[in-house]
Amino acid sequence: MLSMLEYIKTILQKVSFDKSLFEKELAKAIKMLIPKEIKQLKRWCYAQFGKVYRVVLNHCFSRVRVRFT
């Protein structure tokens, strides 16, 4: 069985063809995860999609900065 984080990674890979859908799913994913998982997701997202969706990633992850502290 997949963990929630692994499931979210799968979803993001499947919707990565569409910027608005990717952003929507990423925002939804961030709301479901605990801070430790968000950090892992952030590292993975920048490694996988940083070249294509850097602006989207910056926007979505900047909203949760407070939760990391």
Image (cartoon, helix red, strand yellow):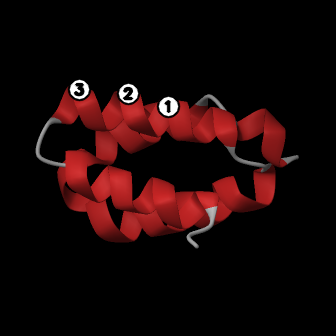
At x 62%, y 28%, the residue is 63
Question: Which residue was labeled with disc 1?
Answer: 27
Spatial CA distance of label 1 from label 3 is 11 Å
Q: Say if mark 1 contacts mark 2, CB within 8 Å.
A: yes
At x 67%, y 39%, the residue is 32
Element under label 1?
helix
Element under label 2?
helix
Q: Say if mark 1 contacts mark 3, CB within 8 Å.
A: no
**Amino acid type indicated by mark 3:** Ser
**Amino acid type indicated by mark 2:** Lys
Q: Is residue 19 left or right of residue 9?
A: left
**Among the two numbered marks 1 and 3 on one chain, the one whose residue lies closer to the N terminus:** 3
**Amino acid type indicated by mark 1:** Ala
Instruction: List x then y, in percent, for residue 68.
Output: 80, 48
Question: Which residue was labeled with disc 3?
Answer: 20
* Residue nearer the viewer, 32 or 1: 1
Classify 10 Å Cα crowding around label 3: few (below 14), some (14-19), many (20 and above): few
Classify 10 Å Cα crowding around label 1: few (below 14), some (14-19), many (20 and above): some
Q: Quadrant of residue 56?
A: top left
Instruction: List x then y, in percent, for residue 6.
Output: 52, 67
Q: Say if mark 3 contacts mark 2, CB within 8 Å.
A: yes
Question: Which residue was labeled with disc 2?
Answer: 24
Q: Is residue 37 left or right of residue 15?
A: right
Is 49 placed above or below 28 here?
below
Spatial CA distance of label 1 from label 2 is 5 Å
Element under label 3?
helix
Instruction: List x then y, in percent, for residue 13.
Output: 27, 58
At x 58%, y 61%, the residue is 5
Spatial CA distance of label 3 from label 2 is 6 Å
Point out the image quarter for the N terminus: bottom right
